[in-house]
Image (tube, helix red, strand yellow):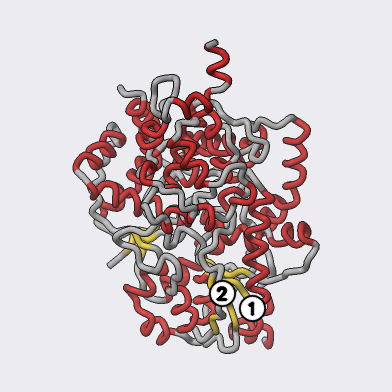
Amino acid sequence: MSYAYYPGCSLEATAREYDLSFRSVFTALGLEFEELEDWSCCGASAAHATSKLLSLALPARDLARAEAQGKEVVAPCPACYQNLKQTREYVLESEENRAKLNKALEGTGLEVKGEVKVRHPLDVLVNDLGIEALAEKVAEPLEGLRVVPYYGCYITRPPGKESFDDVENPTSMDKIIQALGATVLPFTRKTRCCGGPVMVSNEAAMHKLSYEIIKEAKEAGAQAIIVACPLCHMSLDAKQPEIEKHYGEELGIPVLYITQLIGLALGLEPYAELGLDKNIVSTEKIVQKYSKKMVKAKAE
Amino acid sequence: MQKYIMNNNDKFVKLLGGITLSGVDFKSEVIAAGGEGITACYQCGTCSGGCPTVSAMDYTPRQIIRMVNLGMRDRVLSSRTIWLCASCYQCQVRCPREVKITEVMAALKSIAMKEGYNSNIANPRAVSFYRNFNEIVANLGRQFEPLLLLKATLGSREGIASKLGYLLKNAPFGITLMKKGKLPFKPVKIARGDEVKKIFENVAKMEAGE
């Protein structure tokens, strides 16, 4: 089965390495996908704050396009994932809802039926591919690497009929990390908000929340924080130098996308295929230790 | 007398058992905008206990819910709280009464935006951020982050000095991202952007009751 890949706006810009590593890893694992043609923005938090109807009508266009192809949608950005998933749930809830959204689509020639599922890559990896199949593909086990998985909000919240992980203590990313040979450290802030959604409107609130997450990861002895959300990544990675300055404290902990970590263990090229040079906090130490491709290139 | 009542709206609302003076029941308005379950709240405060941004709020989520149920319209819509809600859904998933608290906050934001409430000092760019976000999506079909940051800042309610200050402060961050090739110079315009425009138009019409 091939998936309709919905990158979302962030993966075309600030989260370029998430897009790159998603494509490389899914391809290497034999998970077929094709980018959803002419996809549009899901509306993110702005549509949600403007009007409930708008927040459902924008993703409805994308869902309708995927339905026309009969493909399940895979959306790596948890905000996109939630918006698309909630739209499907809304459509399936009642005839009335479905009619309402199709009225909002009037004049576009599109119709939404709620026929295709919306999936997050973590869901696909754990439940379609399976942890054992993933472990079999590991070429370079990440032995000795200690990390904390950080899930953030929208991977599990709000839960719906097709949720794939526990809302208070998700473990899908933990299982993947362990299958790669790395060690998962206990972490209490797995699903505590990073403050990303208030980054532009209230910087101080975001700094505080992200600082607490980074700090706990450091105190746990983690060598990296592993994420699966572009906004969490921006708060914890790109904003980390700012947070260090704000709190007058050196943190320097790399933040990797789960797909970058998987790619390393699969033996993919760390820069061209995984974009590990695009993270703001340097990932060099991890790359040098775990990427045989790098070691070979250096020796040559 | 009428002026006195308006100025002391919240007090009278209490006396009138939650009915706002405009004759519209505020909680029904919030429910209609998506804030389901709000009347089921029994004030346990689980929402406030788990809220990540509560320390910066002027009213806790529990208080906001009570205030909505009491019809304290103006005070709720003028609060900082609604703009500080990060929509993380922590409160909503833990609520023992199944109040859709995050949806209540979103409904309050949407009512406040429609009526031009943007008085809070805590979040000068919140409304401008949402408005410009929608505008860019309506025009291009997708978001274009550099333009959004610029427009959200310039369109905020701050003075010109703090607008420029904010942009200057964030310039090094922009340069860092640019160096990494993470800040595109040109927006992507989708092929059938007219469909997205049409959706915005349809929604506006449907909400106006046409």
- Specify the label residue A64 is tagged with: none
Residue occupying the point 39% across, 42% down: B38
Query: What secondary structure is marked by label 1?
Result: loop
- Specify the label residue A220 is tagged with: 1
- Extreme residue in the front direction: B15
Query: What secondary structure is marked by label 2?
Result: loop
Q: Position of residue B187 (x, y in %)?
A: 55, 43
Position of residue A217 relative to residue A64, above or below, is below
Q: Position of residue A165 (x, y in %)?
A: 38, 68
**Can residue B196 be seen in this snapshot?**
no
Amino acid found under the numbered disc labelled 1: Ala
Q: Position of residue A114 (x, y in %)?
A: 25, 51
Q: Earlier in the sequence, mark 1 or mark 2?
A: 2
A222 and A73: which is toward the camera: A222
* Left or right position of A262 against A244: left
CB-based contact (under 8 Å), mark 1 and mark 2? yes
Q: Where, by quadrant of the figure, is residue B158 drawn?
A: top right
Count of all numbered marks drawn on residues in the image: 2
- Marked residue chain, label 2: A
Residue occupying the point 63% across, 56% down: B181
Q: Position of residue A127 (x, y in %)?
A: 33, 73
Position of residue B6 relative to residue A143, above or below, is above
Residue occupying the point 59% across, 52% down: B53
Q: Where, by quadrant of the figure, is residue B96 drawn?
A: bottom left
B133 and A194: which is toward the camera: A194
| C-alpha gap between disc 1 and disc 2 | 8 Å
Q: Which residue is label 2 attached to?
A: A187
- Marked residue chain, label 1: A
Q: Where, by quadrant of the figure, is residue B204 drawn?
A: top left
Quarter of the rendering occupied by the C terminus of chain A: bottom right
